[in-house]
Amino acid sequence: MSSVDVVIPCYKYGSVLPGAVRSVLEQPGVDVRVLVIDDCSRDGSADVARELAAADSRVTVWEHETNKGHIATYNEGLLDWASADYCALLSADDALTPGALKRAADLMDEHASVGFVYGRPLHWDGSDPYPHARTESQGWIVYDGEKWLRRRFELGDGCITSPEVVVRTKLQQKIGGYDPALPHTGDIEMWMRFALHADVGYLRDVDQAYYRVHGNNMSVNYYAGSGVRDLQQRLAAYEALLDRADGTTRDVAPMEQRVRRVLAKDALRRAGRAYDKGRVDAEPVEELVEFARKAFDGADKLPEWHTLRLRQRLGVRACRALSPLVLTAAARRLRQTYRLRQWKREGI
């Protein structure tokens, strides 16, 4: 039986912590341990964690005397505590679907070249009971690590939420932990770093975790204001990955230019949408344009640059009136629909 260690960081989530822990302890077909790290919650969350540990010897609790933040807490569990064949990081307000760990372990048991496995996350609003999850195995896809990595540079974003991932523990500890310079996109950089060293496994047509979506998600502030901070952190993740590549990936320069171009186009499209929605005063248009210029030297030659300048000449009122006729908006929706379907089908 494969062994899996699951690290559950907890900061003021004592009310939902039992559900996360229970979703791990009830996993069939694997030998599991749980480490709950309370990051100095001071709201009774640590008391809840200790009660869970008292009820099941597979649960261990560590308590921080001072708040260390999420990155340090993640790394403490994954690098200093985990010792099983495989390990996973699960937020205290998320949960695993039934059989998730065995499905991931079976794939890595069969394919020694795979460094981590993921499936689909099932977005969830925290209501009880959990929504229906697809748990019957439908097979898997094993991607060459470098090809999977290049796909990330082509699209400029991640395809993984986080709780749906199980990693090979020895490889995790070999490549190191989450980068404290990337509080928002450390996970994207981490999965790409795995792909530098190993292949990637995707479990098809199955839900691996419940990802709770709510107003207190740590990522919310990064998406505010048309997501300038999100774009900045995404670019920083790709730059950090390339710094760590150290000759392990061919044709690094074209990859960097590609992702810079993609992110610049994204920023300019967001600026254009501010005109179409009449939100120029509320959205940081100039910050988006400045990001595009800094990210990609040829930003002023991109089609999105010229369409933004056209919107600026027309003015907000005309743009709002004409927005239903803008063909680029329809093309964007088609592109998004295609990507969503591909992600659902192939995980990339």
Image (cartoon, grey):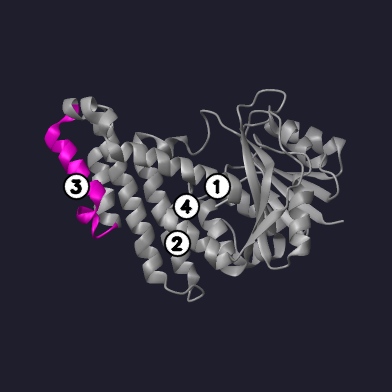
Disc marking residue 195: none
Circles 3, 1 touching at the beta carbon (< 8 Å)? no
Percent x, y for residue 321?
A: 22, 25
Pointer 3 or 1: first along the chain: 3
Q: CA distance from mark 3 to mark 4?
A: 32 Å
| SS at mark 2 in the image | helix
Q: Assess disc 1: are there few (<14), some (14-19) or many (≥20) residues with their C-alpha within 10 Å of its C-alpha.
A: some
Q: Quadrant of residue 129?
A: top right
| Residue 188 seen | yes
| SS at mark 4 in the image | loop
Disc marking residue 182: 4
Q: In the rendered structure, which segment of residues is drawn in magenta?
A: 296-316
Q: Assess disc 3: are there few (<14), some (14-19) or many (≥20) residues with their C-alpha within 10 Å of its C-alpha.
A: some
Circles 2, 4 touching at the beta carbon (< 8 Å)? yes
Q: Is residue 11 left or right of residue 168?
A: left
Percent x, y for residue 70?
A: 57, 45
Q: Is residue 190 above or below residue 218?
A: below
| SS at mark 3 in the image | helix
Pointer 1 or 4: first along the chain: 4
Percent x, y for residue 227?
A: 37, 40
Circles 1, 4 touching at the beta carbon (< 8 Å)? no
Q: Assess disc 2: are there few (<14), some (14-19) or many (≥20) residues with their C-alpha within 10 Å of its C-alpha.
A: some
Q: 277 and 139: which one is in front?
A: 139
Pointer 2 or 4: first along the chain: 4
The answer to whether residue 308 is magenta is yes
Name the residue rendered at 31%, 45% in the picture. Answer: 267
Disc marking residue 240: 2
